[in-house]
Image (spheres, rainbow, N blue to C red):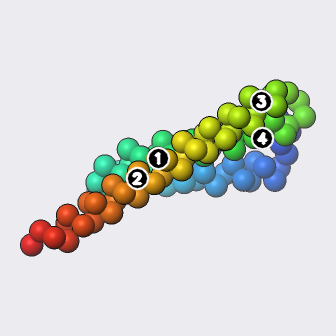
């Protein structure tokens, strides 16, 4: 199954966004995330989907067509960047309003 995802090195690369998702989900249970979780969790989900799609494209056992693999991964990365920037804006706005109120 590891070969489906592009080999052991790519599986390690997939572990990075997966651990980010787990960390965000665990932190949201212990701390107030001020709505930023709405953006960061889907952003890391897009990143994970992009990595999985690229891994399947590079894998040897399951063939993903080139337009689907590369195009889908690029679309997911654009989604990741958009959601991540929106999450950062949400955090920045919450930080500004919290410091302005006495």
Q: Nearer the viewer, mark 4 or mark 3?
A: 3
Q: Distance between the residues labelled 1 and 3?
A: 24 Å
Q: Nearer the viewer, mark 1 or mark 3?
A: 3
Q: Earlier in the sequence, mark 4 or mark 1?
A: 4
Mark 2 touches mark 1? (CB < 8 Å): yes
What residue would you read off at disc 2?
87
Asked whether, in this view, residue 27 is left or right of residue 54, the answer is: left
Q: Which residue is drawn at 54% across and 50% down?
A: 81
Quick one: 19 or 89, which is closer to the camera? 89
What residue would you read off at disc 3?
67
Quadrant of the image containing the N terminus: top right
Asked whether, in this view, residue 88 is left or right of residue 101, the answer is: right
At mark 2, the secondary structure is helix
Q: Position of residue 84 (x, y in %)?
A: 48, 52
What residue would you read off at disc 1?
83
Q: Distance between the residues labelled 4 and 1?
A: 22 Å
Q: Distance between the residues labelled 2 and 3?
A: 29 Å
Query: Callout 3: 10 Å neighbours few (<14), some, many (20+)?
Result: few
Mark 4 touches mark 3? (CB < 8 Å): no
Q: Distance between the residues labelled 2 and 1?
A: 6 Å
Vertical comparison of 20 with 62: above or below: below
């Amino acid at each position: 199954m590891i070969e489906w995802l592009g080999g052991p090195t790519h599986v390690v690369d997939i572990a990075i966004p997966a651990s980010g998702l787990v960390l965000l989900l665990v932190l949201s249970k212990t701390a107030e995330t001020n709505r930023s979780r709405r953006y960061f969790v889907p952003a890391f989900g897009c990143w994970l989907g992009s990595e999985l799609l690229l891994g399947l494209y590079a894998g040897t056992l399951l063939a993903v067509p080139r337009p689907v693999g590369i195009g889908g991964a690029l679309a997911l990365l654009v989604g990741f960047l958009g959601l991540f920037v929106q999450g950062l804006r949400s955090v920045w706005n919450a930080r500004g309003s919290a410091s302005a109120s006495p």
